[in-house]
Structure formats: C-alpha cells, structure tokens
Image (spheres, rainbow, N blue to C red):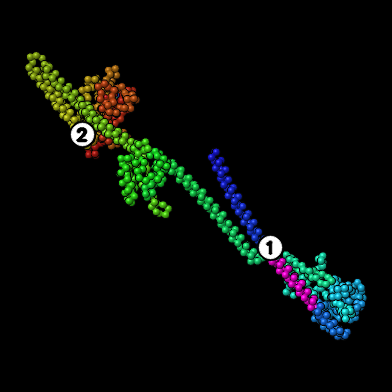
Amino acid sequence: MKFSLHTLVRRWRGAWRRWSLWTLLVVLVVAMLGTMVWLAGRYEASQVQTLLERDTADAVADIRVALTRNLQSLQALHASEPGDLAWEVDAAELLRNRRELVRLEWRDAQLRVRNYAQSPYRPVAWDARLREGSQSDAALACATARRMSSPAYSTSYFQPHGDGLGSEMMELCMPLSAGGRTTGFLVATYSLRDVLVNLVAPTLTRSQEASFTEADGTRLAVLGASRRGSRMFTAKQLLDLPGTTLVLRMDSWHTAPSVFPNVLTALVTAMSIALITVMVVLVRDNRRRLRAERDLADALAFRKAMEDSLVTGLRARDLQGRITYVNPAFCDMVGFSAQELLGQSVNAPYWPPERVEEYRQRQATRFAGTMPPREGFESEFMRKDGTRFPVLIIEAPLINAQGLHTGWMSAFLDISEQRRVEELSRASQERLQATARLATVGEMASLLSHELNQPLAAISSYATGSINLLEAPPLAPAGDAPAATAAQSEQLQDVRMAMQQIARQAERAGKVIKSVHDFVRRRDQAREAVHAQQLLDAILPLVSLQARKLGVRVETSVESSLPPVLCDRTMVEQVLLNLARNAMQAMDDPSIPRRVLEIRARRAASNQHSGWVEFAVGDVGTGIPAEVAERLFTPFFTTRREGMGLGLSMCRTVIEQHGGFLGFTPREPRGTVFTFTLPVASSNPITP
Ligand code: ADP
C-alpha cells in the first residue's frame, strides 16, 4: 500500500512536471508569435506613417514654392507701371493660368478698388462694399503688408458663392511702391481648396486626403480621396506664411490590422505555422517515445522477474571467456555473489581445482568455434564451501541484435537431487531383484514339497496297507486249504493293486516335479482335451481316502453332454485336489452335522462364458472370515499350523494361465464354494 502510494505520488509529480513544461513552452511560443506579428504590424504602420509625413512635407514644400512663384508673377504685373487696360488683360491672363487665384484687385493707397479682374472658372458674388471695409480681411492683410513693407497674407474666411455654396478664401496683399512711397496694393484672393487641387502634386493627393485646418483642428478645405481600409494614419505640417499660419493635414486610410500586411508578416506567419507543426510533431513524437519507454520498462521488469524466479542458472560469457552476466539462481547454486563472479575469465571460482585443466581445455575448444551438443553435457561444479555437485550444462552462442556472435550463453541445472533419486532407485531395484530371485527359489522348493506331499502320502498309505496285508494271516478258517488259497490269492490281488497304485503315485510324483519345474520356468504346458469326468475320476481315489479318514461324504455331479475342456491335466487335477483337501480340512470338526464335500462340473451360466466349463468345490465348513478373505491368495498366507499357504495362490496361477477365473462365495447356511472356469476344447468332441 505504502509502495503503491509512493509510486502514485511519483508518477503524478512526473506527469505534472511534464505537463507544466509543455504548457510553458506553448505559452512562450504563442507569446513570441503574437509579439512578432504585432511588431510586424507596427513596423508596417510606422512605414506608412513615415511615408505620409514625407508626403505632407513634400506637399507643404510644393505649396510654398508655388505661392512664391505666384508672388513673382503678381509682382511682374506691376513691374512696368501698367495702364488700366493692360493690367486687366494681364490680370485676366494670370487668372486663367493660375486657377488657385480667384480674384485680383488693384487698390490705391487708401485701399479703394481701382481695378479688378475675376477668375473665369468660378463665379463668386463679391460684395464690393464689404471688401472695402476697414475690417475686411483684405484691409487687415494690407495693414500688415504696409507695416512690414512686404506681401502679407490674411487669415482664411468663408466666402459664399453665387450658387448658394461657398468656399474658404485667403487674401494676399502686396504693397505697390514707387520712389519709396506706397502707391497702392495688389490684393489677390486664393481659394484654399484650389490651392490644394492645383499646387499639391496630384500623386500625393490621389490616395490620401489633404486638408487645410486651423490650429484647433477645424477643417477649412478638403481634397478628398476615397477611403480604403479601416485604419487612419494622419500627418500634420505647418505652413508658415507672413501674416498667417495654416496647418496642412494628410489622412491616409489603410486596411489594418491585416493578417498578411506584407512579406515580413507573411514570413513570420509561415514560420509560426511551421513552428506549431514542428511542435505538434514533437508532442506526438514525445508521446510515442513515452509509450515506447513504458513498454520497454514493462519488458525489462518482466525480464527481471523472469530471471529472478528462474530455478535454472544462467551465465553469459563474452568471446574472451569473461563472465558478463549471472542470474540469482546461478549465484545460489554455486554460493558466490554476482560481484565475485562477474569479469572472471580463467579459473572460475566454482571449478573444482583438480578438474581446472580439463575445464580449461573444454573452454578453449568452445572458443575455437566447436558447437556444444544441443542436449547439453554433464559436469561437476564446486560450491563456495568446497562441496561438489553435478550440473547439466546447455550452451548456446550468444547472438546480438546485429546478428554478431558476441559470446556464449549457458543454462545450468543442479542435478544432484536427480542423481540421488537415480542412485536410490537403482539400489532398491537391485535389492528387489535379489529378493525376487530368492522368493522364486523358495516358491519352487515349497511348491515341490507341497505337491509331492500328496503322492508320497498316498504311496506311504498304500505301502502301509500292503505291509498290513502281507503281515496279516489269511482270513480263511483253519484247515480249509482251498479257502485259504482263495483268501491268499485275494490278499495277493489287493497287494498287487496297492503296488500298482504305489507305482502310479510314484509316476504322478515324477509328473508333479516335472510340471512344477515347467510351471516355474513358465514353459507352455502341454494342453489336451479332457472330460470333466476324467479329471474327477483321477482325483477321487485320493479324495475318498482322506474323506473316509475324516468322516466326510463325497458327492460328485457332472452335467450331461458336457464338452471336454482344454487344459494341462496334471495341473488341473492338482487344483481340484487342493480345493477338495482345503474343503475337507474346513469341515474337520465332528460337531458339524452332515459333512458333505460337493464337486460339480457344468457349463458356465453366463453368455459371456458360454465357451467355458465351471467346476465348483463346496463344503459346509467354517467359512472364510473377511480378514482372511482379503489375503486368501497371498503366497504363504495360512491359518493352519502345518499349512504352507501356497495352495490357493498356486491354484489361481494355474487357472489364470488357462485363461480362466478362480473365486469363492460363501454358502448358506454355512461353508464356502470355490469355483473356477476352464475353456471348452475345440468343436471336435473327444469321446471319453
Ligand atoms: P494351506 O492349505 O497350506 O493353508 P492354502 O492356500 O490352500 O494353504 O489355504 C490358505 C488358507 O485359506 C487356509 O489356511 C485356510 O485358512 C483358508 N481356506 C482355504 N480353503 C478354505 C475353505 N474351503 N474353507 C475355509 N477356509 C479355507
């Protein structure tokens, strides 16, 4: 929790710093671009303003030059003492040429109008009385001119025209003198608008508005140009004339602030766009880089976790054999720390000293370019504490990202545990085999003795019987010779029969030894087709012998038309004998009423076993308790003192070798039935 909170805070801080830096960068770039655009606009405006100032100055200079030229022309009118008529002609000529002049008056020294001429271009309703008044503008200008003895201008005044309109006018009064005495005045009337129209170069007024204004800004005359754009630039220049001062004002209209006012602004804008594009690309690139960094960090963390959790030791060596990397599992395995191992080349500390030479040679062959076996090889390493342990080494060349062979990568598996287990299982296997051999020998010996018991017992009892017969006196009454002979011959008959039985039992014992021998060697027994009745007949004499001794009745039944079975006759007889003997032993208790041994043979009941004959040996004995039943077929398990516990296990083996099944079921009200099956011999029936 603490860790995750710490990580969260660190991440948040990192993100905040990154974002604040980016925001600062964006603000700075936008501010810089804004300033540049504004400066470009301002530069353009100042250019326009400077141009306008220059135009205004030029216009004032033009006007001044023209007024001076006019003054000279007016002086020339009176240069040669003209007569009235000549004056009129010359004045009319002058007025035709100088359109800014509207009227010329020749006045005498008392300012009365002596003669006058008017512009043919402009009809003005002059009021002669007003003009001659002592307070008229002309009179004031002349007063100034007289005082200064030089031409003087009046202030401007509004003069109505005949057509209801009017315009701003200005008077120029030029004193006329002869012999140092003022003889009169020449008064010239200027129309201010015409001054603008005619005296200012048309190039200056075509795109700009020129006007005469008073000092307080009142417009007197305007020469307008059409307005273009929304921003107005204004320049003013004083026109100083003797007697009066006018202000020439020029207004210029521009489309401002325009986005692309000139090349500079366009350039700045283009650069800004490029800059923003670069910034966007940079942001994207940065984002991609961050993502790549994160992916890389994830991959590294995954790799580290993987290396740390591996149980396989990993070691990398460069081409000179120096250790360049070891993982924690390898360090754990050999007991050295990574610092102790890294950089080691010859005589690695985990090499057992006695095998150093061998390992060095192995390393040399590896570095000479011999490829290690793909399945790995086994070797022995030494821990830091000096103990040795076996390892499985799998080596592979280390190829870097450029495809160059830069060293060797090895994986190590500590196989000591595997070795220990192998050793353990080998030892126990050997012990097991020895025991098994011993058991087989024992089993064989026991089997032999067990199986020989019966024929030998039979031989012994026949021999005893024969001896008894030979020793006993003939049972005939004394003196009766023929009877005695008959009795003797009967006895001899019995003895012969006993001897035959002895011979047969001896032969049987021989067969037993042979068949047990075969059985132990697991040789295929000689199978033959035998009728169930034949099998029963073979064992009955022996069974009856024991039954008689124990007081047990023997009942046999064989299903009619039962097919013969295919079996090893001697072995199956042994099985029947064993089961019959066990059954009689279970009934070896005189308190049991009606002790009967039942031996039956019939066709197996179930369909599945239709090709089988079932034999059953039943008794009314003690029965088999559960704990005995569990171990009944275990070799050497017996409940009898003189028993060997091999009978049933042998029986089951024999029956199973025939492909049959041996089992038992309890019997009501008491006793047990042992049953086994044998395969029916081929369809070719054999007559008994
Ligand atoms: P053994 O006859 O030498 O004891 P077996 O393998 O023939 O060896 O029998 C094992 C044990 O099974 C016997 O000791 C006996 O306790 C039990 N057993 C075998 N057959 C019967 C039977 N029909 N009724 C009761 N118990 C039996």
Q: Is residue 355 magenta?
A: no
Residue situated in front as seen by the camera: 339 or 284: 339
Q: Is residue 56 magenta?
A: yes
What residue sits right under mark 2 in the picture? Answer: 518
Quarter of the image with the N terminus in it: top right
Q: Are marks 2 and 1 in contact (CB under 8 Å)?
A: no
Secondary structure mostly seen in magenta is helix
3D distance between C-alphas at marks 2 and 1: 126 Å
The number of discs equals 2
What amino acid does circle 1 point to? Arg
Residue 451 seen? no
Numbered disc in front, either 2 or 1: 1
Q: Is residue 191 shown above or below 262? A: below
Q: Residues within 10 Å of mark 1 (few under 14, many from 20)?
A: few
Instruction: Kindly identify which numbered label has been placed on residue 42.
Output: 1
Question: What is the magenta range?
Answer: 43-70
